[in-house]
Image (cartoon, rainbow, N blue to C red):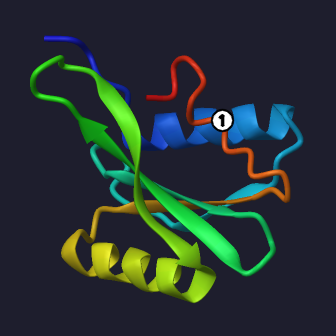
Amino acid sequence: MTPRLTAEFWVQAYLARLRLADIPAFVTTKGDLTAGAVLVKLNPLNGQAWAFQRSFDLMTGERAWVTLAEGVEADVDAAIERQKSFDPDLWVIEVEDRAGRHLLEEEGLA
C-alpha cells in the first residue's frame, strides 16, 4: 500500500506552493487533520467561481481534480455548503486569483 499524506500536510504544502506563486489563498473550513477530503474554490474576483474536488479513478488508480461546481459565486458557495453538510471532515480552501490560477494541474498536487 502506498503511504498517504495527511490532509493537514497536503493543505499546508498546497498553501505554501500558492504563496511561492504569489497567489492568495486561505482555509475557510478546517477538516479532519488526518483523512479529511479537500475542496478548492477558485475565486477570480469577478462574481464567478469554481469548486474542485479530488477524484479517484478506480480503473487507473490515479487521482485527478474535477469540477464540482462552476458559475455564479453564490451558487458555487451553495454547492460547497451542501458538501460540508454531507462531510464534517471536509477542508475548503479558497484561492483568489484574477488570472484564474489554482496550480492543481501541477505535478504532485493530485
25 displayed left or right of 90: right
Image height of 46 relative to 61, above or below: below
47 displayed left or right of 53: right
Measuring 31% from the left and 28% from the top, which residue is drawn there? 63
24 displayed left or right of 93: right
26 displayed left or right of 72: right
Q: Which residue is nearer to you in this view: 79 or 33?
A: 79
Decide: few, some or many residues near mark 1? Use Cα within 10 Å; few <14, some 14-19, many ≥20: some
Secondary structure found at label 1: loop
Q: How many marks?
A: 1
Q: Amino acid at mark 1?
A: Leu
Q: Which residue is nearer to you in this view: 46 or 21?
A: 46
Residue extending furthest right? 22
Residue 85 placed where, x, y %?
26, 81
Measuring 56% from the left and 63% from the top, which residue is drawn there? 50
Q: Which residue is mark 1?
A: 103
Find residue 61 and report its image quarter.
top left
Q: Which residue is nearer to you in this view: 90 or 110?
A: 110
Q: Which residue is nearer to you in this view: 107 or 17?
A: 107
Q: Quadrant of the C terminus?
A: top left
Residue extending furthest top? 1
Residue 48 placed where, x, y %?
67, 75
Measuring 22% from the left and 34% from the top, which residue is drawn there? 56
Residue 8 placed where, x, y %?
46, 43
Measuring 61% from the left and 37% from the top, which residue is drawn there? 14
Q: Quadrant of the N terminus?
A: top left
Residue 96 placed where, x, y %?
76, 61
Image height of 101 relative to 74, above or below: above
